[in-house]
Each structure stands twice: as structure tokens, then as C-alpha cells.
Image (cartoon, rainbow, N blue to C red):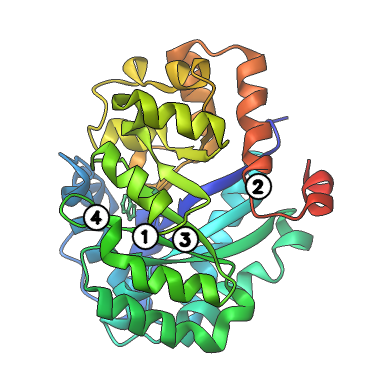
Amino acid sequence: MPLPKAELHLHIEGTLEPELAFELAARNGVELPYADTGELRKAYEFEDLQTFLNLYYELMTVLRTERDFEDLANAYLARAAAQGVRHAEIFFDPQAHLARGVGMGTVVEGLWRALQHSEPVHGISTRLILCFLRDESAESALETLEAAKPYLDRITGVGLDSAEVGHPPVKFREVYEAAAALGLRRVAHAGEEGPPEYITEALDVLGVERVDHGLRCMEDEQLVARLVRDRIPLTLCPLSNVRLRTVDTLAEHPLPAMLDAGLMCTVNSDDPAYFGGYVGDNFDAVRSSLGLTEERLRELARNSFLASFLEDDEERRAR
Ligand code: HPA
Ligand code: ZN
């Protein structure tokens, strides 16, 4: 039995497996510049975040209809359930779809068609987190939040993703204030490739409750002390860090040092179709490469529920 866990850092578009990408391309008459899944898989060699994002945005063009988003989410939920996931807080990137003429309603309703049956079918409770693309303008983020207003009963929070360096959190102050006023929870990617200052800024300026990645906090002792003191959860993604070359090898991942420092770490998959594994695979990888004890692994799983946006009684039931 895999350890029951919550997944808090998962981009639904990053769960698009090559087989489903080709199936949807055929269904929607979209031409992919790869002969077959084998050739596509050969493109999964990334130098950094940007080289990954280029492929991520290219492949998601096969997603066009509500049914496509429903199929994508169902495929993820089935795989996650098999790896012990009981609760998933799922990121989606509406701007990447709106730019292609795919409406907010198509994305949210399509995902919802899968999520509304997730508890009985997969045994997974879910939340949706709308992410703003930080390499797009602040105005575009505000327009995106406006477009999401009819769907706020289905959206729990907002996040910030895509190319980090050069796009500091402060750029999104206004849209995060507007999101908070609407009662939305707030998270942001920070300190993946960007400097520790972006983590501080995400906390101080955007008011985030959780930091996605946050790996580079380890370069700033005072920041680590603050994150420990305030019990700010970090959603780490070890296999992603290796594939995007944020760390050289898994054996050198700072997760053990982060746990020793008292940081509230969780382990997640990020974009599992691209980075070589789902969340259970990430747990297996850190167990074998970092020699984490069973007790540490249980701590990571427990943290995932504590750091989630589940209410207290729901949280207990999920565990
Ligand atoms: N980092 C930033 N943006 C992203 C990622 C990531 O790992 N995956 C999808 N969008
Ligand atoms: Zn991410």
C-alpha cells in the first residue's frame, strides 16, 4: 500500500502523456511536429525551466474541448490514486488556453467534469488553483481573474508560474490583492530558478500561504529561520529539479538538509508526464537516492495534508 498523501504542486497540463497528446491531436485535427510518441519522448531533454516550458506550451495546443480537459484530469486522477494520493490541489494555466481561443469556461467546466466525480471514482478530494503566467503582463493577469469570476465557486486559490527570472512577485501585487478580496487562497512559485528575494517578496507582497518550490531559500539563513518559525509550507518537486537542472543529481538534493533545518517540506510531482514520475515515484526516488528514513517519509506525507487547503475535519477523513 503506498503511503496516503496529498499532492499540492501539480500542473494539470503537465500530466499530458505523449499517448494522450497524440490521441487528442488526432481527435482535434492538430498537427504535432513529431512522427510518433517515441520521437516526442526524445524531446524530453531539458536544459532549464525555459526549454521545458517551450515543449509544455507546444504540446498543450492539442487541448481544445471540455472533453479534452476532462480526459486529461481523469487520466491524472487514476494515476495519482494508484500512487496513494487522497487529495490533490491542481494548478491550471488559463492564459495558455485563452491565447489559443479556448475559453475559461471550456477549461474550468472540462476539468470540473472529472473533479466532481473524483471522490467516489478515485477516492481523491480536489481543489483547483488558477495560475497566472508571470512572463505575461500584470494587466493580462487582471483580465484573467476577471474572466474567472463566473467560476469562482470551483476555484480555491491563485498561483504564479512559468518563467521566473526577471518576473518578480511584486509585478503581481494588484492581482493578488484582488484575489484576496475575492476570498481566494494564495500560493506562488518562488525560488525555483529565481533568487531567495523572490520568496521573501511572495510572502510580504503577495501574502502567499505556501511557497511552490522555494528551494533557493537555503541560500538565505534568515529566510530559512522565518519559514521555519511561521511554518510556511514548501512544495518541493525533486524529480522536476533534476530534470530542469536546478540540482545536478537527486543525491545532491537539499531535501534532507531542509528537513533537518525544520522546514515544512512536502514532495510533489510538478509536471509528471515530463519529469519521469508521479508523486509516488518522487517519494520512491527520494527514499532510494537520499536515504530518507520511513519516519521522514511519513513526516512528508503528514505535512502534505497539514499544508493543504482542506478544512480540519476533511483533512482527518482524508488521512
Ligand atoms: N515552474 C514554473 N512554471 C511551470 C512549471 C514549473 O515547474 N511547470 C509548469 N509551469
Ligand atoms: Zn510548478
261 lies above or below 115: above
- Mark 3 vs 2, N-terminal side: 2
- Relative placement, left or right, of 123 versus 128 is right
Q: Distance of mark 1 from mark 2, alpha carbons?
A: 26 Å
- Relative placement, left or right, of 233 versus 236 is right
**Residue at 48% across, 73% down:** 179
- Mark 1 vs 2, N-terminal side: 2
Question: Is 265 in front, or is 100?
Answer: 265
State the image coordinates of residue 196 (x, y, percent, origin top left): 29, 37
Identify the mark at residue 81; answer none if there is no mark.
2
Q: Which amino acid type is shown beneath numbered disc 2?
A: Ala
The image quadrant where one finds the N terminus is top right
- Check if mark 2's residue and mark 4's residue have beta carbons within 8 Å: no
Locate residue 237: give its quadrant.
top left
Q: Which amino acid type is shown beneath numbered disc 1?
A: Leu
Residue topped by disc 1? 160
Question: Is 200 in front, or is 280?
Answer: 200
Residue topped by disc 4? 168
Q: Which amino acid type is shown beneath numbered disc 4?
A: Pro
- Disc 3 vs disc 1: which is toward the camera? 1
- Mark 2 vs 4, N-terminal side: 2
Identify the mark at residue 91; answer none if there is no mark.
3
Q: Secondary structure at mark 4?
A: loop
